Image (cartoon, helix red, strand yellow):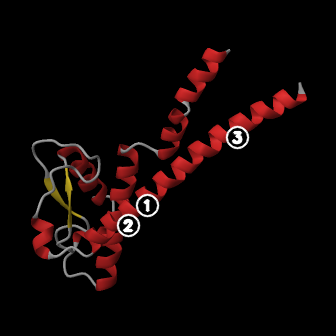
Amino acid sequence: MKQQLDLNNSNISTILNSKLGLLRDHVELEINFIEKWINSLTNQSKLESTKRKELCEICNSKEDYFEGHHIAGRKHDYRQVTACKSCHRWLSDKQKTWDKRWEKENLSENLRQAFFLQGLQDILILKSKKIENFLEALGYSYTENISELLKRG
């Protein structure tokens, strides 16, 4: 009986470790993708800022119409992200809640950088709300194993 219990725990550990290994690989790929994406926004040229992607960079929707969202606000920086109408509206509404100096023009470099980072923070927060959370994906990844074990009784 004790040997059978150890064998079952070993099977569960194998399943869990296998799924965690896959998650580790997935998270590493996601981090690399996000790093490249953030660097592309940060190092964007004026010409690149005017080009629209074929999908929303926040929620990945492929609507027919996309808008450019100025990350720090149009007055403060040319860099943009491609957004669907819904994501653009949320980001623009969020900008209206920022420090009131955001409404002024000709800001110091420190304030311009602060507003760029504020915009990037808002983009990342919205993106995290719109895309699948990897922990949820990990949870669902056990479905096949659960079904198989339930069938075995």
- Crowd around label 3: few <14 · some 14–19 · many ≥20 (10 Å): few
Q: How far is mark 3 from mark 2, CA to CA?
A: 32 Å
Q: Identify which amino acid the numbered label 2 is placed on.
A: Glu
Quarter in which the N terminus is drawn: top right
Q: Are marks 3 and 2 in contact (CB under 8 Å)?
A: no
Q: Secondary structure at mark 3?
A: helix
Q: What residue does disc 3 label?
A: 13
Q: Mark 1 belongs to which amino acid? A: Ile
Q: Is residue 83 left or right of residue 33?
A: left
Q: Nearer the viewer, residue 123 or 45?
A: 45
Is residue 99 among the parts visible in the rendering?
Answer: no
* Left or right side of 137 for 74: left
- Which residue position holds label 2? 35
- Mark 2, secondary structure of its residue: helix
| Mark 2 surroundings within 10 Å by alpha-carbon count, few (fewer than 14), some (14 through 19), many (20 or more) | few
Q: Nearer the viewer, residue 60 or 142?
A: 142
- Rendered residue at 19%/47% (across/down): 84
Q: Position of residue 81 (x, y in %)?
A: 22, 61
Residue 14 image point, x, y percent:
67, 40
User: Which of the two labelled residues, at mark 3 and mark 2, occupies the earlier sequence position?
Assistant: 3
Determine the CA span between mark 1 and mark 2. 6 Å
Which residue matches tag 1?
31
